[in-house]
Amino acid sequence: MTEKTNAMRTLEARKIPFETYTFDPDIHSADGVAEALGLSAHQVYKTLVVVRQQGKPLLVLVAGDRELDLKRLARAVGEKKLRMASYKEAESLTGLQVGGISALALINRGFDVYIERTATELSHILVSAGCRGTNLKLSVEDLIRITRARVIEATAEVGE
């Protein structure tokens, strides 16, 4: 039995259905999670922490088979310049470990949340449960609603 995370408690409190998937907590990447679970990397989303020049960082949900384009993201969110948070910064800013950062675990913490448009092509995706080794599968519609995520286009396929 998996230990209940704050993300799970939030979903349960709002009666949002989800499925729990567990894997080796040493896996810290969405494509690694997809491989371990026998899924397409297109279904497993990573939560990236992106730093603005001023203000609270952004959380950007991106499929495991996509790469974030910071220039496209900056245009999409109306910022001049953005940069990826380092692992240490991401952990300090969110209070969660890299590989376990989750927008669901950070609801009401003031983060602007964005999700790549490719997610809207799917009915359900997997996202971190807020700890390493556990992901949650839920509907894209529910995820967008509960996190107040804004749908944007800011990625390219890996290797593009």
Image: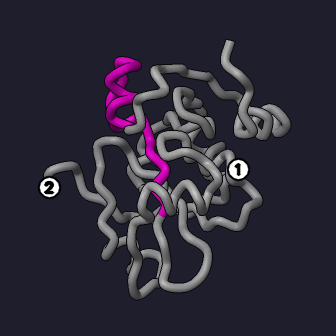
Q: Secondary structure at mark 1?
A: helix
Q: Tell me the amino acid under the disc marked 2.
A: Glu
Q: What is the x, y in percent for residue 52?
A: 49, 78
Residue in the picture at 43% in, 28% down: 26
Tell me the number on the disc at residue 146: 1
Q: Position of residue 20 (x, y in %)?
A: 61, 22
Quarter of the image for residue 139 reads: top right
- Crowdedness of circle 2 by 10 Å Cα count: few (<14), some, many (20+)? few
Q: Is residue 119 left or right of residue 7?
A: left
- Furthest-top residue in this view: 1
The answer to which of 109 and 45 lies nearer the viewer is 109
> At x 35% / y 18%, what residue is drawn?
38
Near-viewer residue (151 or 80): 80
Is 74 within the magenta? no
> Which secondary structure, mark 2?
loop
Q: Quadrant of the C terminus?
A: bottom left
- 37 or 89, which lies in front? 89
The relative height of residue 67 versus residue 16 in the rendered view (above or below) is below
**Residue 160, disc:** 2
Q: CA distance from mark 2 to mark 1?
A: 32 Å
Residue 83's disc is none
In primary-sequence order, the first of circles 2 and 1 is: 1
Q: Whole-percent x and y of residue 100? A: 54, 40
Within the magenta stretch, is there residue 46? yes
Task: State the image coordinates of residue 114 (x, y, percent, origin top left).
Answer: 52, 61
Q: Residue furthest right?
A: 13
Q: Which residues are magenta?
A: 30-49
Q: Which residue is at a point 71% across and 67% down the rendered structure image?
A: 110
